Every structure is written in structure tokens, then in C-alpha cells.
Image: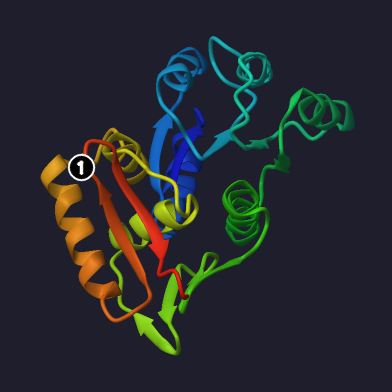
Amino acid sequence: MRVLVIEDEAAIADAIGAALTNAGHAVDRLASGRLADAALRDHPYDLIVLDLGLPDVDGIELLRRLRLRADAVPVLVATAREALEERVHALDLGADDYLVKPFALREFEARVRALLRRRTTQGVPELQIGRLRIDLPRRRAHVGDEPLELTPREFGLLEALAARLDRVMSREQLIDALCTWDTTLTDNGLDIAVYRLRRKLEGSDVRIRTVRGLGYLLEADDDA
């Protein structure tokens, strides 16, 4: 999943970014509300982690603009503002969760997992496609009882395709989901990831199908 962290305190941004990266997500970071507003207009994200006390554009204003554009991306507010009025205002404007600093990283990670489950699988922590089981919180996959040994990029690819089962994802959508501004993914890199994941799914009843000119989709055999 691709996550945008909007946080102007470098130490906090580093810790949050590291936790998300270690969980296998592609992470972009910005410290400016103005730059974040521009990025959100140009790039799709699966989750936003938003500080409210930002320079140049306050986080509340950023949230208001986002929802006025009818952008439904989940927003986890992570801020030092603890007043009840602030929490209520942010939630009323469309924030999906609100976490007050300082917070434990384990709680942050759990809230991230909950929001991403809600977005991709209607809150279900495990996807079952034929004999393929995908454990989203633990980022593990099994075919039957046999574990699939997947790299973070391969799991991210499987997760992105599985969340849109039987629907085509374009190459551009997959690259956006798997890369950040600091870590690029070339067309050739995507081809390699698809090839390797296909090899690991051999023998299962799930396959990645190429839709020429459009992209890829994950599908189960008709009798699965």
C-alpha cells in the first residue's frame, strides 16, 4: 500500500516512516501542508497520516480541502492537539481516526492495519481466494498449509491485486502502489515482480492474468 506521511517534526516522521516501511508499505513523506495539498491532487494514496500543526497550511484545512474534492482516502490524524473540540472537529471533517502524541508505535501500527483493512477488504483481516490465504496484518500468504516465501515487493503486488480481485489494475496503478518518490520502480522491475509472483503461485488455483493493453488481474480458477 502507498502511504503519505505529512509531518514536520523530522524525528516523528522518521519513526513513522520506518514503521510503515518495515510493514512493507511504500511511504512518501512531506513536511509542508502546501506541498502535501499538491501531492494529494496528483497522486493516489491508500492512507494518509496527517499532523495538524503544519507550516503554511494547517492540517485541518488540508483535511477540509481533501474531503471537498470527494477524496475518500482514509486519514489517520496524529497530532499533539488533544482537546476534545479538536478531535471532534477533525472527525466531523472526515478524519477516520485520531491519535494523540506521544503514542506507542505498536498502537499506531495497529490503527494503520485497521484502516487499511477497512479500505481494501471491508475490515476482513484475511483474504481467501481459492486455496490462497492472505494474512494482511502479518503480511503472510499460504497456499493451503504451505507458506509462500514472498519478498515485500511481491507481497505488495499480491495484496494490490487481491484487493481488486477480478478487476484489472493498470501497470501505472501497480507501479504507484509499489513505489515512492525515493524508490522508483521501472516497467522492467514490475515485469520481474509479476514473473516471480506468478512462479510462486504455480500449482495453486490462483493466477495473474495479463489483459493486453490494460494491465493485470488476479483470478481464481472457475472451479475454485
Does residue 165 sit above or below 188 in this rendering? below
Q: Quadrant of residue 80?
A: top right
In-image side of 172 versus 28 (left or right): left
**Along the horizontal axis of the image, is 117 left or right of 219?**
right
Residue 173 location in percent, x, y? 35, 37
Give residue 48's quadrant in the image.
top right
Residue at the far left in the pictured view = 188
**Residue drawn 54% across and 9% down?**
56
Residue for badge 1 = 185
Between 182 and 86, the one lying in front of the other is 182
Q: Give percent across and percent down for residue 85.
A: 88, 26
Front one among 46 and 63: 46
Q: Residue at x 81, y 32 (%)?
A: 87
Residue lying at 29% horizontally and 81% vertically, measured from the top left: 203
Q: Is residue 163 above or below residue 36?
A: below
Residue lying at the far bottom in this picture: please name it: 145
Q: Position of residue 5 (x, y in %)?
A: 49, 35
